[in-house]
Image (spheres, helix red, strand yellow):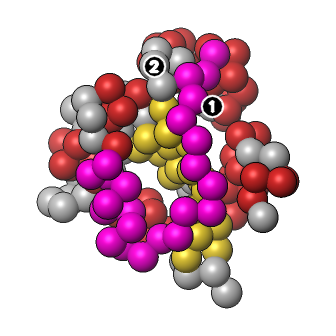
């Protein structure tokens, strides 16, 4: 059964013109795009999205960065989408990411790391519902 995951091309990647190249990598890996939109989000919206990281020392700068410019919000679908996207993304810190991964190719730091991907079924469901209405996912 195909599975859905939620992904964001983060402001650093969009700003640097990597949107097309990253979408090509996602396409080549066999994902279908269920929904996609380019949007600049507010700090409050970023805080709600990353609420699980509220107590982390980097929460302020993370939400500042995520609201610093346009990003691309997506729902992606394939067999094993959640784990496969995480694998394609590479480690959170691009310095530790495997060769060929999106973060190795396009990210510059542990914070400005180009892409987000849901880490579990429950978080994928929460994140998809946070950014997309039901009618956008038909
Ligand atoms: P994401 O949730 O964005 O897919 P991830 O699951 O690999 O990334 P998390 O631990 O969930 O990593 O951290 C969320 C985001 O917070 C990271 O992607 C990164 O942008 C930022 N971040 C994580 N650790 C740090 C840190 N030590 N300093 C600054 N920013 C950080
Ligand atoms: Mg995460």
Q: Is residue 119 left or right of residue 1?
A: left
* Residue 79 belongs to the span the image colors magenta: no
Q: Residue at x 76, y 40 (%)?
A: 130
Taking the spot 36% from the left edge, 73% from the top edge, the residue there is: 29
Question: Which residue is drawn at the image coordinates 81% and 46% (left, top)?
Answer: 133
Residue 58 visible? The answer is no
Which stretch did the figure color magenta? 20-42
Q: For the residue with label 2, is its CB less than 8 Å from the closest atom of ligand 1? A: no
Looking at the rendered structure, which numbered label has been put on residue 50?
1
Residue 85 in percent (x, y) is at 45, 63
* Element on which disc 2 rests: loop
Other-residue count near label 1 (Cα within 10 Å), few / some / many at <14 / 14–19 / ≥20: some
| Label 1 beta carbon within 8 A of ligand 1 | yes
Please check the rendered image and state whether residue 36 is part of the magenta-colored stretch, yes or no: yes
In terms of image quadrants, where is residue 10?
A: top left
Please name whichever residue, 94 or 85, is drawn nearer the observer in this view of the structure. 85
Residue under pointer 2: 69
User: Which comes before the other along the chain, label 1 or label 2?
Assistant: 1
């Amino acid at each position: 059964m195909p599975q859905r995951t939620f992904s964001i091309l983060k402001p650093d990647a969009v700003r640097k013109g990597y949107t097309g190249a990253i979408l090509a990598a996602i396409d080549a890996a066999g994902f279908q795009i269920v929904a996609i939109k380019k949007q600049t989000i507010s700090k409050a919206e970023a805080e709600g999205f990353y609420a699980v990281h509220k107590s982390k020392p980097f929460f302020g700068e993370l939400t500042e960065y995520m609201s610093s410019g346009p990003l691309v919000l997506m729902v992606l679908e394939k067999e094993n989408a959640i784990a496969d996207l995480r694998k394609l993304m590479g480690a959170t810190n691009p310095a530790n990411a495997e060769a060929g991964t999106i973060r190795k190719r396009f990210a510059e730091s542990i914070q400005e790391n180009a892409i987000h991907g849901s880490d579990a079924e429950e978080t994928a469901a929460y994140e998809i519902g946070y950014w997309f209405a039901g009618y956008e996912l038909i």
